[in-house]
Image: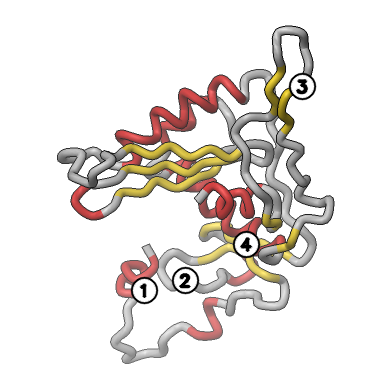
Amino acid sequence: MLAAYSIFANGGYRITPYLIDRVVDSRGNVLSNAQPIAATEGAERAIDPRNAFIMTTMMRDVVRAGTAARAMQLGRQDLAGKTGTTNDNVDAWFCGFNASMVAIAWIGFDQPKTLGTNETGAVAALPIWMNFMAKVLKGVPERPLQPPEGVIVARISPDTGLREPEDRGGIAEYFYSEFPPKLRDDVLPGPGSSRGPGEIRNQLF
């Protein structure tokens, strides 16, 4: 799971996660060193950097206004992630990251059984992740998310899921430059259509 989320954090490269950077003895001799491969130094590219960016913007919204909004208490704007809860509340997860750190919190039993009512990822796992990240990111400058080349931003109507004329109003979303969304006025149902704006909004949101 950590390897998968690191792909979004680093712009699309497959790397091997590590927990311990190095081990030294009482004399300062290095006994073990992780020596990870950096995301841009010979690492295998797993996905298009635009894919990684757009997925990150989606998970950033989870932190800013979704199920992980409590993480905003950390006072950072560069966090993204996703809560997760399996059937019957057997497992609770939070997978979160910024550009320099990926961490995952999991709560569950060795022999799977329910954690109890309302023990979701946001309730059980997220606080653990927040406690860890508050320490490891202390003093670490924020790294604003920058769109890679080939990404455009368009404003989308929440009623239709289509691009607003002249990008007025709506919700800002990112797209591949070669696949811009259609304009709202181009494809709206004509008079007499049975498809109303409310139906489309419900499908999207």
The type of residue carrying mark 2 is Gly
Residue 181 seen in the figure:
yes
Residue at the disc numbered 3? 30
Marks 2 and 4, how far apart in space? 13 Å
Mark 2 near mark 4, Cβ–Cβ under 8 Å?
no
Q: Secondary structure at mark 1?
A: helix
Residue 57 seen in the figure:
no
Residue count near mark 1 (Cα–Cα under 10 Å), binned few <14, some 14–19, many ≥20: some
Upstream in sequence: badge 3 or badge 4: 3
Mark 1 near mark 2, Cβ–Cβ under 8 Å?
yes
Which labelled disc corresponds to residue 200? 1
Q: Is residue 88 left or right of residue 120?
A: left
Nearest the viewer among 139 and 147 is 139
Percent across and percent down for residue 129 are: 46, 31
Which quarter of the figure has residue 173? Answer: bottom right
Mark 2 near mark 3, Cβ–Cβ under 8 Å?
no
Relative height, residue 51 to residue 37 (above, below): below
Residue drawn where x is 71% and y is 18% of the image: 24
Q: Is residue 122 left or right of residue 101?
A: left
The type of residue carrying mark 1 is Ile
Residue at the disc numbered 2? 161
The type of residue carrying mark 3 is Val
Marks 3 and 1, how far apart in space? 60 Å
Residue at the disc numbered 4? 174
Percent across and percent down for residue 198 are: 31, 70
Marks 1 and 4, how far apart in space? 20 Å
